[in-house]
Amino acid sequence: MLSLYNTFSKSKEEFKSLNPGKVGMYTCGPTVYGKVHIGNFRAYMLSDITRRYLEYVGYEVRLIKNITDVGHLTDDDVAQGDSGEDKMLKAALKEKKSPEEIARFYEEYFKLAEKELNIIPAHFFPRATAHVPQMIKIVEGLIEKGFAYEKNGNVFFDVTKFEDYGKLSGNTLENLKVGARLEEHPDKKNPWDFALWLKAPENHLMKWPSPWSVGYPGWHIECSAMSTEYLGNTLDIHTGGEDNIFPHHEAEIAQTECYTGKQYARFWLHNRHLLIGGKKMSKSKGNLFTLEDVLEKGFSAMDLRLLFLSSHYRSQMEFSFEALEQAHKNIQKINDFVLNLEAAAARDLVSPSTIDTKSVQEKFEAAMDDDLNTPLALSVFYEFISQCNKLFATNHLDSKSAHDILALWKKTNSVFGLVLSGQAEIPEEIKELMKKREQARHNKDFSTSDEIRALIEKHGFIIEDTANGPIVKIAD
Ligand code: AMP
Ligand code: ZN
């Protein structure tokens, strides 16, 4: 039984989809005015692991991840839709490109980085700029129903009209009154009202006609428009980073529920932040690393993927290259494990099976069922690897067990999503050379076998002679 921590109820709840067997899932995607950083990827990893595990347990998942390509009017910290700068415009001016060019460039960058991290692409990546009519329709509906008001070409959502405002974040109007105040907009009735539509200043590049002004949408409305367009009025799961809880997701709930009259998202999943020196890694602070920074230091995207899996998404995670080094070692350990299994599976050792793969699978599933506890699921495997390594060392792993363990690894790795440099990636020519070398060794023709080893190494591979026979790996 899968249980997920729902930010809305602040408790773990058994997950069941609204429509049997099918899950509608929405993830707040990137703002494409710059390179996504590895902190952002922590959020996309949560979405990926959730989706992968739902698929593992048999659901058909439809995942939508939006592309925020409307220049934003907000600041990472304020994010209330009424202050701050247009980041897309700023980036466009700096790079002497149109906002569209900037957005397409960074969208492509984001998708490539997701691919390198083996994050399964969403079924659709809707762009905010292609959904302005849908946003306008919702805003019109909200005005009609009395939840929103227009003044001087600007439209705001009236938070006092939504009883449940603050239920997700705890920022109820009562609590907000005693908290920090926002920079006020002269056209707002209440300081916590948020923008649905804003009149564009002269120099604003991205603007659209609307019933109220030539302007642009507030940040929050795009997710309501795109999620309901592709998933219907009620989503099974909505994910994002913890900074999205307020005001973004609180606003999404308010405007969508007031518009549709239905519950918006049944489960809200939020990852805690990736920190650097104790502070949130963020674009606006500039204290960030990109995937390229990680690769340039000699690490792989899989090292980073494993690092993310090694901490639970609801605990804060401090990024460091030392931790990445440990993840790198663990990837090698898993890689060797799979190579050893492939070597053991390929030979004909028949002996009574000593390995209980069923209990490993059960422990893995118990960990994942408990709010996607990936570090625990990994530790089940690390323990199992140690157990198997003893058998490899003494040449005691029979072929059937090796096959069974490999099958288990493949199944569970559909959730971990680690791409290993296993035998599958070894070219046929190298495999042929390996066979010839084995033949030469068998004939005690060691000078030929040494020559072949040198040739294999020249092609960038290394050979390790293990108790289970030789294995070949891609050289580091
Ligand atoms: P943005 O492009 O700023 O809208 O962020 C995209 C996603 O990344 C959102 O879900 C954010 O909550 C998430 N995010 C941003 N910074 C971090 C961080 N340091 N750690 C984890 N998630 C983050
Ligand atoms: Zn969003």
Image (cartoon, grey):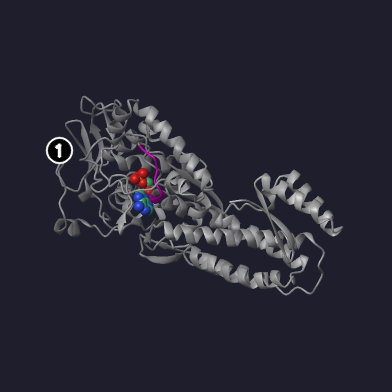
- The magenta segment is 34-39
Badge 1 residue CB within 8 Å of ligand 2: no
How many badges with numbers are in the image?
1
Residue, disc 1: 187
Q: Residue at x 27, y 41 (%)?
A: 145
Tell me where residue 133 appears, x and y as whole percent. 36, 31
Give neighbour class at mark 1: few <14, some 14-19, many 20+ (Cα, 10 Å): some
Q: Residue at x 68, y 65 (%)?
A: 405
Residue 36 on the magenta segment: yes
Local secondary structure at mark 1: loop
Tell me where residue 399 appears, x and y as whole percent. 77, 65
* Residue 380 placement: quadrant: bottom right
Q: Is residue 28 visible?
A: yes
Compared with residue 85, is residue 260 higher up or lower down, i.e. above or below?
Answer: below
Residue 385 on the magenta segment: no
Tell me where residue 247 appears, x and y as whole percent. 27, 50
Between 336 and 312, the one lying in front of the other is: 336
Magenta span: predominant SS is: loop
Between 294 and 123, the one lying in front of the other is: 294
* Residue 11 placement: quadrant: bottom left
Q: Residue at x 20, y 50 (%)?
A: 160
Q: What amino acid does circle 1 point to?
A: Asp
Q: In screen coordinates, is 107 left or right of 160?
A: right
Q: In screen coordinates, is 286 left or right of 389?
A: left
